[in-house]
Amino acid sequence: TDAYQPLREMKEHEMLMMKKALNYSYENSTILDIGCADGLFISEVAKELPKALITGIDISSKLIDIAKAKKCQNCTFLVEDAEKFEPDKKFDLIIASGILSVFDNFETILELWLKWLERQGKLIIFGRFNSRDIDVKVSFRNNYKASDWEGGLTSYSIQTIGRFLDRLGCEYEYNKFIFSGDLPKNKD
């Protein structure tokens, strides 16, 4: 939660996703943000689509508290696990930013998320995808703080995801994202 302060500007990838989200949405859309973190992204989408019904889920209660403090009128924020969430409705648009790499089995989670979509719904996934046909799973341990081995840095190849979506009969497109700035090194 340290990366999400109550007051921050939208990140570069969030601004790009917002353009996509607004392109795929309409006035009365139902939108789900999986792993909504501090809720800033969907709060900004809500300003552009005040009649949309927007739901944000995140596994972190601390982040959901930050999101709720934004007082977004047409947003509902829930502490939920992206694998166990059982929505009571389908969505016109689902956004999953930086979360697919957390799952060791992308097929199970993508099938689940696709089931949550309306018939003509769209799923936007922002994340790390390998342009070579190589899938990579990474484990790490942060020795700057007490930490067990963690995952979450998996990088599936574009081809692997494409073959899976082809089998499901889904249409899809990839958009390359190149960060334009410089990131300062953190102490940890």
Image (cartoon, helix red, strand yellow):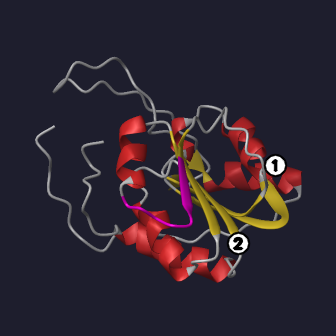
Residue 75 image offset from top left, x and y in percent: 54, 61
Mark 1 crowdedness (10 Å alpha carbons): few <14, some 14-19, many ≥20: few
Q: Which residues are magenta?
A: 70-77
Q: Residue at x 40, y 53 (%)?
A: 67
Q: Residue at x 42, y 36 (%)?
A: 61
Q: Is residue 11 above or below residue 136?
A: below
Please tell me the numbered disc located at residue 124.
none
Observer-nearest residue: 137 or 118? 118
Observer-nearest residue: 166 or 7? 7
Q: Residue at x 68, y 54 (%)?
A: 159
Residue 131 seen anywhere in this rendered image of the structure = no
Left or right for 114, reference 66: right
Answer with the quarter of the image where residue 27 lies. bottom right
Answer with the quarter of the image where residue 182 lies. bottom left
Q: Is residue 76 magenta?
A: yes
Q: Kindly indicate whether the residue at mark 2 contacts the one at mark 1 (C-beta within 8 angstroms).
A: no
Q: Which element carries disc 2, helix, strand or loop?
A: loop
Left or right for 183, reference 57: left
Figure quadrant of the N terminus: top left
Residue that mark 1 sits on: 115
Q: Which element carries disc 1, helix, strand or loop?
A: helix
As drawn, the residue found furthest toward the left would be: 187
Residue 91 image offset from top left, x and y in percent: 74, 60
Question: Callout 2, which amino acid?
Answer: Ser
Q: Is residue 53 magenta?
A: no
Residue that mark 2 sits on: 29
**Mark 1 or mark 2: whose residue is earlier in sequence:** 2
Observer-nearest residue: 143 or 28? 28
Residue 156 image offset from top left, x and y in percent: 58, 45
Q: Nearer the viewer, mark 1 or mark 2?
A: 2
Mark 2 crowdedness (10 Å alpha carbons): few <14, some 14-19, many ≥20: some
